[in-house]
Image: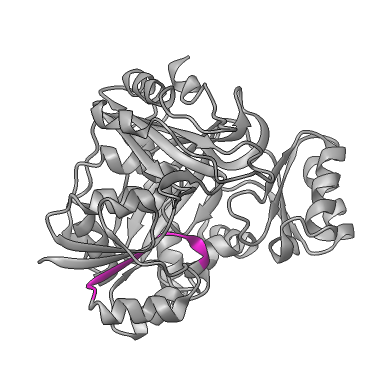
Amino acid sequence: MRMRVLVIGSGGREHAVVWKLARSAVVSEIVCAPGNPGIEAIAECVPIPVMDLDRLVTLAVDRMVDLVVIGPEDPLAAGLADRLTASGIAVAGHSAAAARIESSKAWAKGVMTRAGIPIARSLTASSLADGLRAIAEIGGDGPVVIKADGLAAGKGVVVAGHRAEADAALTAMIQDRAFGAAGSTVVIEERLTGQEVSILALTDGTAIRTLAPSCDHKRLGDGDTGPNTGGMGVYTPTRHVDAALLRTIHDRILEPAVRDLREQGTPLRGVLYAGLMLTADGPRVIEFNARFGDPETQVVLPTLQGDLGRLLHGVATGTLADVPEPVHSGAAVGVILASGGYPGPYPTGFPISGLEHMETMDDVLVFHAGTKRAGGRLVTAGGRVLTVVGLGGDVRVAHDRAYEAVARISFEGRQFRSDIAHRELA
């Protein structure tokens, strides 16, 4: 088996997916739409936006691709996988109906409740008055979590420390439309405490293959301070998840979710991302996502010893049970280099220097996200610009390699956290 693969997306996650697929024994050709300057070095890039579904389907048909891998959540929610399937193309990506596990947090809560999955206590509100009552009931005057129901690029969550902060966040979402239509309905949750862990699992709707656990740092600043972002850094593995706990997560969280959606006639066929809080009472689900996490993918895939092409083909064709359980080795630490001003408004177009040094550094990878070519130079073009990944036998070695590489890359306004993996190394 040798496959032509089309990867949809343009971020660091897709760069990592393409990088890993390029090492697959069953992949002969990779096309990416729209791609980025980093992906251009290892695959053909076609400048079609991820939400131009008509042209993406035409591209897949014209190129006679054997497999499409959909990276971002927006085209999944819009039904790209459905349209590709209808055209006879195998897809590693959920139908729009199944992707509601990410595109509607309220709907996902219903799935988790029905399946008996351990979650935080929550209420849903679609008006300011109902939301204020829910905040009072769930959190009183203390901490509470406010989540926009719809897709908000990973930023539609506010962890409020007290009542006034919670009320302000609710008002911004429902009344001021801070996240547009995504915040017209909100979910108010109790604030859980513990270690937060990300689990990426592949499923064809029946079989499940769980990848290595990782820990993301969502807050902008050192010491987990500042606003939430799409993620400022990540590492794998974590001492907080051993083989026994991973089996518990599979049995109590992943398997019930996959089974419930299959029984409802909307099977998952792609990546199920579980954001978990390891509480004193065991793991609880903070959120489900319907795709590879970003930046988790950038550290999990480099430590994967298995063949990603075989795994994703199994996902798309319902044959995942025939693919061996994935094995991971070593450690990886990823540090995000972001534009000044992110996650708020930020300027772009600043030249990036120092990437030439990466070619002489062992066990360092750089995945592009917010970059582009302009006037013959590589410049910034987004909020999260690069993910710099260090590899090693343990988290300490990987951490040191990542930050050694970070010190050699620069652009105007560059910001990054200096404490990625601090909890693991403390």
Q: Is residue 289 above or below residue 100?
A: above
- The image quarter containing residue 60 is bottom left
Q: Residue at x 84, y 63 (%)?
A: 127
Magenta stretch? 65-74
Q: Is residue 139 above or below residue 76?
A: above
Is residue 208 within the magenta segment?
no
320 on left or right of 211: left
Residue 256, visible in the rendered structure = yes
Q: Position of residue 48 (x, y in %)?
A: 43, 70
258 on left or right of 318: right
Q: Position of residue 68 (x, y in %)?
A: 31, 68
The extreme left residue here reads: 1
The extreme right residue here reads: 129
Give the camera-side residue of 74 and 266. Answer: 74
Q: Residue at x 27, y 49 (%)?
A: 19
Q: Quadrant of the N terminus?
A: bottom left
360 on left or right of 346: left
- The image quarter containing residue 244 is top left
Q: Position of residue 410 (x, y in %)?
A: 48, 29
Is residue 72 within the magenta segment?
yes
Q: Residue at x 21, y 48 (%)?
A: 325
Give the camera-side residue of 74 and 236. Answer: 74
Residue 251, visible in the rendered structure = no
Give the camera-side residue of 377 and 278. Answer: 377
Q: Is residue 141 above or below residue 137?
A: above
Q: Position of residue 65 (x, y in %)?
A: 24, 74
